Amino acid sequence: MVWCLLLLTAGFAVFLFQWLPRRIIRPRRRLINLDPGDLGFAFEASTLLTDDGLHLATYYVPATGPARGNLLILHGKDSARELYLEYLPQLVPYGYNVLLIDARAHGRSQGTYTTFGYREWADVVAGVRRLRYLATGLPTGVFGHSMGGAVALQAMARSPEIDFGIVESAFTHLGDITHAYACRQSGLDLPRPVIDCLLDRADHIAGFEHRRVEPLRAASRVRQPVLVIHGAEDRNIDVDQGRQLYAALGSRQKELFIVPGAGHNDITEVGGDFYFRRLRAFLDEVTAVH
């Protein structure tokens, strides 16, 4: 009996401090055999070189008519750029050049671990510079979903090269969202100090500082126009986190769009045409002033 308890304790310790930290920072790769051409759009597939030497996979899709702005689209954790192809018919014919990017350690991009914005914010700035090179003289912004939204806030707080942002289903603190995730994975109500130890272990493995990943604090330093979107029924990241991010924004021009009945990953499905009209209304407004 004692040996069984010891084995169970050892097994749980391995799960908690070896498997779980790696699961948090090592995304599932999704390789999807689709591209913008499957939707009838001309595109350029290329790679983007990061400051630390990684090649990130991208699709550049130019506007099909007179261009009015550029938009970089950032997906969430365990996702891929192909899952955001549905945005192309809602943006490209309306004058927006779009750059879809696989985040580091996702899809067809290089890298092993994600750092939730600690390094990714610089990748975003590199993507914005690529867009400005491909389509010069146009206002350039970012759209980010979930982790992508958290990364977008951190990038906007650091770089004036980003003119505007759309932040969807994003979290306020990495520690809070990790606590919720670890409790779901373990089936236990884990104490917060355990989560801090877990994240310290993740820091050591991936070489980053989780305490510096604070989208809420970043939001207070953002001055660009921002549209915050959140599903009212989001069970992964509670809608209150979206409201907190909106309230914290230092932007003079900011909007909050709560999508009734939507969860974390079904906002476009639930919001439908109204969602995309609201998205374009914001884009049209922030690109018209340039």
Image (cartoon, helix red, strand yellow):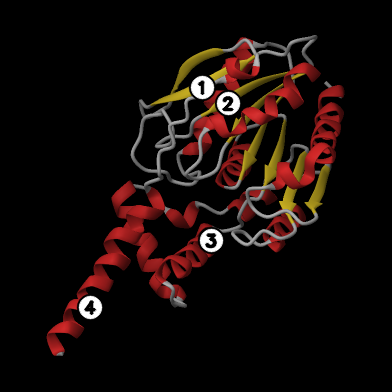
Q: Earlier in the sequence, mark 3 or mark 1?
A: 1
Q: Position of residue 35 (x, y in %)?
A: 54, 21
Query: How far is disc 2 from disc 1 in space, using C-alphas?
Result: 6 Å
Amino acid at the residue labelled 4: Leu
How dense is the environment of label 3, judged by Cα within 10 Å: few (below 14), some, or many (20 and up)? some
Q: Residue at x 62, y 28 (%)?
A: 85
How dense is the environment of label 1, judged by Cα within 10 Å: few (below 14), some, or many (20 and up)? many
Of residues 265 and 200, the one drawn nearer to the viewer in this rendering: 265
Q: Residue at x 72, y 55 (%)?
A: 248
Q: Quadrant of the N terminus?
A: bottom left
Q: Earlier in the sequence, mark 2 or mark 1?
A: 1
Q: Which residue is mark 4?
A: 8
Q: Which residue is mark 1?
A: 58
Query: How far is disc 3 from disc 2 in space, using C-alphas?
Result: 25 Å
Q: Earlier in the sequence, mark 4 or mark 3?
A: 4
User: SS for tag 2?
Assistant: strand
Of residues 158 and 260, the one drawn nearer to the viewer in this rendering: 260
Query: How far is disc 2 from disc 4 in space, using C-alphas?
Result: 45 Å
Query: How far is disc 3 from disc 1 in space, using C-alphas?
Result: 28 Å
Q: Residue at x 72, y 43 (%)?
A: 269
Tell me the tag on residue 177.
Answer: 3
Q: Earlier in the sequence, mark 2 or mark 4?
A: 4
Q: Which residue is mark 2?
A: 100
Residue 250 can be seen in this image: no
Amino acid at the residue labelled 3: Ile
How dense is the environment of label 4, judged by Cα within 10 Å: few (below 14), some, or many (20 and up)? few
User: SS for tag 4?
Assistant: helix
Tell me if label 2 and label 1 are in contact, CB under 8 Å.
Answer: yes
Tell me the tag on residue 1.
Answer: none
